[in-house]
Image (tube, rainbow, N blue to C red):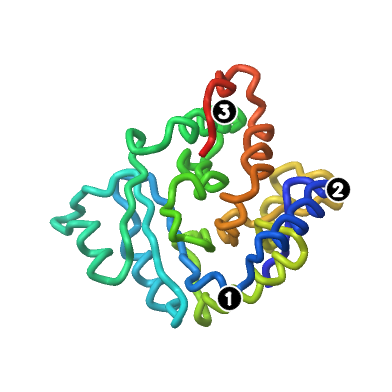
Amino acid sequence: GIRDSVASRGLGDVYKRQVAELGMTNASVPLLHVVFIDDRRRPEYENMIDVAQLGRGSRTAFIALLRYPNVNVSGVNVSETLESNGLQVISAAENTLPKHVKCIHAGLKRLMPRRSKMRGWALLKPMLHWILPTSVHAALVLDTDTVPLQPLDGLLGDLERMREAGAILGLVREQSQFYSMHARMPPNAHGFNGGLQLHDMAAMRRLDAWGATVCCGTNFAAVSYTHLTLP
């Protein structure tokens, strides 16, 4: 299952108390929105459709967050094809992102190693609560090469356990040995798989501490963020 985690142990009790005060329970989340993020000019739309077919349940919905939503690939209109297969397409074009999201994104990009192969739009994951519609209360951010073996809305039970523990972000430990062998990981350090993340979007929007955590984590010495007001 998902291992619940928060950015700081000290904030865990704060989240737990505030979530309890807000009365947010699993019953208040009607759907689990599965979110794919793709910033390529040729989005992997076929993989998204395959994952949606394998992981669809009675309480799942699927979103394709695309940097280039209005593209044709080999004569196929990507957005129309996704929507005809039950996926909602949302634009993540740079000119559509909120000002504070672009500012934080610029700070996160400064933390990336120069030779990193990570795609830049993956850095939007901590800020999805500012990008996706407010109707999205819980989001499972998923890589397109995932193979679901059962309906993904079973993870709503993990969301409830996260709330009981005072966590707003659920992660799983990386199973691959690649990072421990080649990434110079410290002894006994555990990496987490960024390709599967359970976000309590409702809690992230309501708890100001999450926005502050995201901002502090980006090392904003050179970014003029203090002039912006968060929603």
Earlier in the chain: of badge 1 and badge 2, it is 1
* Quadrant of the rendered image containing residue 192: bottom right
Q: State the count of labels.
A: 3
User: Is residue 27 found left or right of 181 in the rendered image?
Assistant: left
Counting other residues with Cα less than 10 Å from the Cα at mark 3, is it few (<14), some (14-19), or many (20 or more)?
many
User: Is residue 206 found left or right of 128 in the rendered image?
Assistant: right
* Quadrant of the rendered image containing residue 227: top right
Looking at this view, name the residue that lies furthest to the right: 187
CA gap, disc 1 to disc 2?
41 Å
* Quadrant of the rendered image containing residue 114: top right
Residue 186 position, x and y percent, is 82, 44
- Amino acid type assigned to the residue bearing label 3 in the image: Gly
Who's the residue at 41% across and 70% down the image? 61
Who's the residue at 60% across and 59% down the image? 200
CA gap, disc 2 to disc 3?
28 Å
Circle 3 sits on which residue? 107
Circle 2 sits on which residue? 187
- Amino acid type assigned to the residue bearing label 1 in the image: Ala
Task: Name the mark on residue 12.
Answer: none
Determine whether the residue tagged by mark 1 lies in a helix, strand or loop: helix
CA gap, disc 1 to disc 3?
36 Å
Of residue 86 and residue 165, the one placed in the foreground of this image is 165
Of residue 213 and residue 135, the one placed in the foreground of this image is 135
Circle 1 sits on which residue? 27
Earlier in the chain: of badge 2 and badge 3, it is 3
Of residue 229 and residue 2, the one placed in the foreground of this image is 229
Of residue 6 and residue 24, the one placed in the foreground of this image is 24
Determine whether the residue tagged by mark 3 lies in a helix, strand or loop: helix
